[in-house]
Image: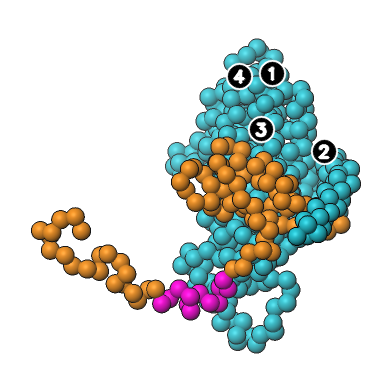
């Protein structure tokens, strides 16, 4: 709930000693698994770290609507159109839950969106890849939403109450996304040779970017350690990535598809799959703006926002007029 | 342009259960808040009834008052039925 945003920059000046005491009490709460709520005292770095993570997450949901929206009018049947519409609508809802969670920390929606449109905010780099065929919609549901779920399930236990509650709603809905994607792949793989080739091609293009979704390797992840101490994050990037590989390879086997990694093989000794090296150069290039669709995505967001401006202004004016009339009638 | 006002959304899931806070949203007026709440928070049969309240109209207790407000109830065990010892032979109590 957003009752009186916990913080608006008016933090009273405290002695270093008092601050250390507050920080210690804060960490003790976290260690005891007590949720932090908007009006509770929190270290400024905790607040900033959460605003960064939650808003990036919200932006990812909203930008993530674009590659799938590309197929709304071309989905192969009415059933598939209805499903895809519902899924894209869900992503909008997820973005909204998350923006709301960020707002409980004193961030304004307007400022968050402006940062995205100005290219100052990050979002998941996976959405900078194009959806070239219908099989890509299946691969996104299966792999991208599958990876997102693995990332998000531990976030349901995040130390910040509003974020944890938003994640619980999102995870419940996300499971439909993953299953509908796998079903699309299944239908293609049971279809003609050309359809199966299309599925294989989609897997080959989405496999590596999906592995990159878990973020840089632990050794290079700047936020992991502190985030884990604050219980914003519960597992390391590499641990989650391994979980994703272990879960996805048998699913690919069932489809009769082969992930594009010659080094991928079951390791009996450790009970996990070994996999080849990830091209982190590509990850950083796409993240920094040089992916196949970065410009197109932000351009589409900006256009939608600018073209909707008059609607937002008219609604606000109408709301004010209604309020004046109600007031005058009293 | 500034953001539309913020609203808190409460949903009653089934007849007989109280409305429960589910989240918040921005809307320019109450009718739009209700319409948006319906779209965002009841896509899977979650609700039978929706309340929307402007966030600024809610007064909340301060975290700092937690001890003053809620600790006194901790030492009043006699408010719970298990505080009283009743012989086993006595039924319906």
User: Which residue is labeled 1 in the image?
Assistant: A77
Sequence order check, earlier mark of 3 and 2:
3
A121 or A205: nearer the viewer? A121
**Magenta segment boundaries in residue numbering:** B61-72
Q: Are marks 2 and 4 on the same chain?
A: yes
Residue linked to disc 3: A86
- Give the left or right position of residue A278, taking residue A20 as reference: right
Residue A246 vs residue A28, the one in the foreground: A28
Say what secondary structure mark 1 lies in: loop
Q: Nearer the viewer, residue A230 or B76?
A: B76
Query: Residue shown at 54%/26% (left/top)?
Result: A253
Quadrant, the C terminus of chain A: bottom right
The reply to the same-chain question for discs 1 and 3 is yes
Q: Nearer the viewer, mark 2 or mark 1?
A: 1
Q: CA distance from mark 3 to mark 4?
A: 20 Å
Chain to which mark 3 belongs: A
Instruction: Classify mark 4: residues with Cα within 10 Å, few (<14), some (14-19) or many (20+).
Output: some
């Amino acid at each position: 709930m957003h009752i009186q945003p916990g913080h608006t920059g008016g933090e009273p000046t405290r002695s270093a000693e008092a601050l250390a005491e507050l920080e210690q009490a804060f960490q003790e709460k976290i260690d005891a698994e007590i949720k932090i709520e908007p009006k509770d005292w929190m270290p400024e770095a905790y607040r900033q770290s959460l605003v960064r993570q939650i808003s990036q997450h919200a932006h990812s949901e909203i930008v993530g609507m674009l590659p799938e929206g590309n197929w709304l009018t071309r989905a192969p049947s009415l059933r598939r159109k209805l499903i895809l519409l519902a899924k894209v609508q869900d992503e909008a809802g997820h973005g909204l839950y998350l923006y709301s969670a960020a707002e409980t920390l004193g961030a304004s929606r307007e400022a968050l969106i402006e940062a995205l449109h100005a290219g100052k905010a990050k979002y998941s780099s996976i959405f900078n890849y194009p959806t070239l065929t219908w099989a890509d919609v299946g691969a996104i549901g299966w792999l991208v939403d599958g990876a997102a779920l693995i990332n998000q399930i531990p976030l349901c236990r995040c130390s910040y109450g509003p974020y944890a509650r938003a994640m619980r709603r999102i995870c419940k809905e996300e499971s439909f996304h993953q299953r509908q994607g796998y079903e699309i792949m299944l239908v293609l793989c049971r279809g003609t040779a050309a359809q199966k080739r299309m599925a294989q091609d989609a897997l080959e293009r989405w496999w590596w970017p999906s592995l990159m979704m878990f973020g840089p390797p632990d050794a290079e992840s700047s936020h992991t350690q502190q985030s884990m101490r604050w219980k914003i994050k519960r597992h390391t990037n590499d641990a989650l990535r391994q979980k994703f590989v272990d879960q996805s390879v048998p699913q690919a086997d069932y489809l009769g598809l082969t992930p594009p990694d010659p080094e991928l093989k079951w390791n009996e000794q450790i009970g996990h799959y070994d996999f080849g090296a990830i091209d982190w150069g590509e990850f950083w290039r796409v993240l920094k703006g040089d992916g196949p669709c970065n410009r197109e995505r932000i351009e589409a967001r900006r256009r939608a926002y600018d073209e909707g401006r008059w609607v937002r202004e008219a609604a606000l004016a109408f709301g004010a007029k209604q309020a004046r009339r109600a007031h005058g009638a009293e | 342009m500034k953001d539309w006002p913020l609203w808190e959304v409460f949903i009653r899931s089934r007849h007989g259960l109280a409305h429960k806070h589910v989240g918040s949203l921005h809307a320019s007026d109450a009718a739009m808040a209700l319409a948006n709440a319906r779209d965002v928070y009841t896509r899977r049969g979650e609700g039978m009834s929706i309340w929307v309240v402007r966030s600024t109209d809610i007064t909340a207790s301060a975290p700092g008052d937690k001890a003053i407000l809620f600790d006194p109830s901790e030492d009043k065990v006699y408010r719970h039925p298990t505080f009283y010892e009743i012989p086993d032979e006595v039924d319906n109590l």
